[in-house]
């Protein structure tokens, strides 16, 4: 499975760090994009993930996390919407952006999971509210919520 993050700020790096620490997905199956080269370099060095300068390169992942600031959602979605298929899951972490609004920007049926992580995620102690769109089946949610492998 490939996991993509469009945006690599504080919340994205908290999520990536937690995913890697728990062994949910290996670093070589994670790809991130960011506006600044320094951000990408830091993500590659810190987490060992793949990086991409263009959001469209991340849009091919099985699960795509939109981790940009809410005011950039429409612009980013317009950039990637033609790359998104019915088989992918889009995860939003933006406050104030409804499922209807995000789906409308994509202009087609998508599998969308709207989430609301909180800042304690940065130290591995966060709680995340999850709200799937009607196109997300329970099997997808089970996969997203499966417990970490025991080591």
Image: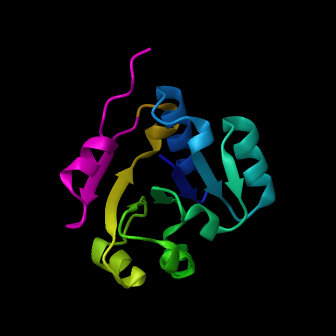
Left or right relative to 37: residue 88: left
Is residue 9 at least partly visible in the picture?
no
Left or right relative to 110: residue 2: right
Left or right relative to 46: residue 59: left
How many marks on residues? Answer: 0
Residue 134 belongs to magenta span: yes
Q: Residue at x 33, y 71 (%)?
A: 110
Q: Residue at x 55, y 35 (%)?
A: 26
Residue 139 belongs to magenta span: yes
Q: Position of residue 123 (x, y in %)?
A: 51, 32
Q: In what quadrant of the picture does the C terminus appear?
A: top left
Q: Residue at x 41, y 83 (%)?
A: 105
- In front here: 73 or 53? 53
Q: Position of residue 150 (x, y in %)?
A: 39, 17
Say if 60 sits above or below 116 in the image. below
Q: Position of residue 40 (x, y in %)?
A: 73, 52
Left or right relative to 7: residue 41: right
Say if 115 sits above or below 18 in the image. below
- Quarter residue 55 falls in: bottom right
Say if 27 sits above or below 95 in the image. above
Boundaries of the magenta span: 126-151
- In front here: 29 or 17? 29
Q: Position of residue 125 (x, y in %)?
A: 41, 31
- Quarter residue 135 falls in: bottom left
Say if 82 sits above or below 147 in the image. below
Q: Which residue in the rendered view is the most extreme toward the top?
A: 151
Is residue 140 at least partly visible in the picture?
yes
């Amino acid at each position: 499975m490939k996991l993509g993050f469009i945006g690599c700020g504080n919340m994205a790096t908290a999520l990536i760090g937690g995913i890697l620490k728990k062994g949910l997905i290996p670093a070589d199956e994670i790809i991130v994009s960011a506006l600044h080269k320094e951000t990408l370099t830091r993500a590659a060095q810190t987490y060992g993930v793949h990086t991409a300068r263009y959001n469209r390169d991340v849009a091919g992942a099985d699960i795509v996390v939109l981790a940009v600031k809410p005011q950039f959602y429409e612009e980013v979605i317009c950039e990637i919407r033609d790359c998104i298929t019915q088989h992918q899951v889009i995860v939003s972490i933006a406050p104030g952006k409804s499922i209807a609004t995000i789906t409308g920007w994509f202009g087609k049926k998508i599998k969308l999971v709207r989430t609301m992580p909180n800042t304690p995620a940065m130290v591995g102690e966060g709680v995340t509210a999850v709200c799937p769109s009607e196109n997300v089946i329970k099997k997808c949610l089970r996969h997203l919520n499966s417990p970490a492998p025991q080591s």
